[in-house]
Image: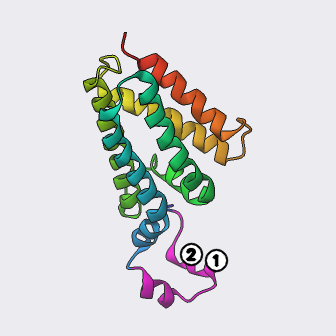
Amino acid sequence: MNNVSIEDITRAAGVAKGSFYRYFEHKGALVAAIIATIGTAARDALAEAVEEIPKARSSDELNGVYLSFAFKIAPVILNHRETTLLYLQEKRSPAGPDTIAIRELSDDIADLAQQMTHAARERGLLRAFEPRLSSLFVIGAVEELAFRKLSGEDLGDPTTMATALMSLVIDGLRAG
């Protein structure tokens, strides 16, 4: 993204540079506007899961919370393919003013995932792994699968993929 200038953006959009600045103060503001939809959906779905996990009384109910999250976020990801790919690519790039919104979203996702893991541990539904690490393991797996799927790799049906991943995660982390 650092190699793309405002001039490149306006030329590709077929608008004058002044038009860009009428709507966006800088490139980072454009990036924030682009990822707003997926960011809001991810934050909302994760926050809802954080609230639902304390109600889970069994591993099956915990799995249901995770699957519910997956089914809420999957359509957003699939309907915003290019935006999700931008997020997945740029969250690992060097930090800079253009990626602030991406970094904030990434941090929020990690924090909410950690809250989910902590809540599940509190209920005795997950083994006592460090919540930060186990949530980062899961985020890494989910993001890698999403990136590959959105990049055109045939990984099968997204629903089957989400169910299999959640089963592996829950079974692997399930309390004794």
Establish if 7 lies above or below 165: below
Q: Is residue 102 above or below residue 67?
A: below
Which amino acid, by three-letter code, is at mark 1?
Ala
- Which of the 4 quarters of the picture holds residue 16? bottom right
Residue occupying the point 59% across, 42% down:
146
For the C terminus, give its image quadrant.
Answer: top left
Residue 27 against residue 38 in the figure, above or below:
below
Determine the residue positioned at 34% across, 16% down: 127
Callout 2: helix, strand or loop?
Answer: helix
* Position of residue 99 measured from the top left corner of the image (x, y, whole percent): 41, 59
Instruction: Specify whether residue 22 is in view.
Output: yes
Distance, label 1 to label 2, CA atoms, is 5 Å
Q: Nearer the viewer, residue 150 or 94?
A: 150
- Judge by depth and name the residue closer to the eye, 139 or 44: 44
**Position of residue 136 measured from the top left corner of the image (x, y, whole percent):** 39, 33
The residue tagged 1 is: 12
Residue 96 rendering spot, x and y as whole percentages: 37, 58
Q: Which mark is residue 9?
A: 2
| Residue in the picture at 72% in, 36% down | 156
Q: Which residues are magenta?
A: 3-24
Q: Is residue 88 left or right of residue 116?
A: right
> Is residue 85 visible from the viewing direction of this image?
no
Q: How many marks?
A: 2
Does the magenta portion include 165?
Answer: no
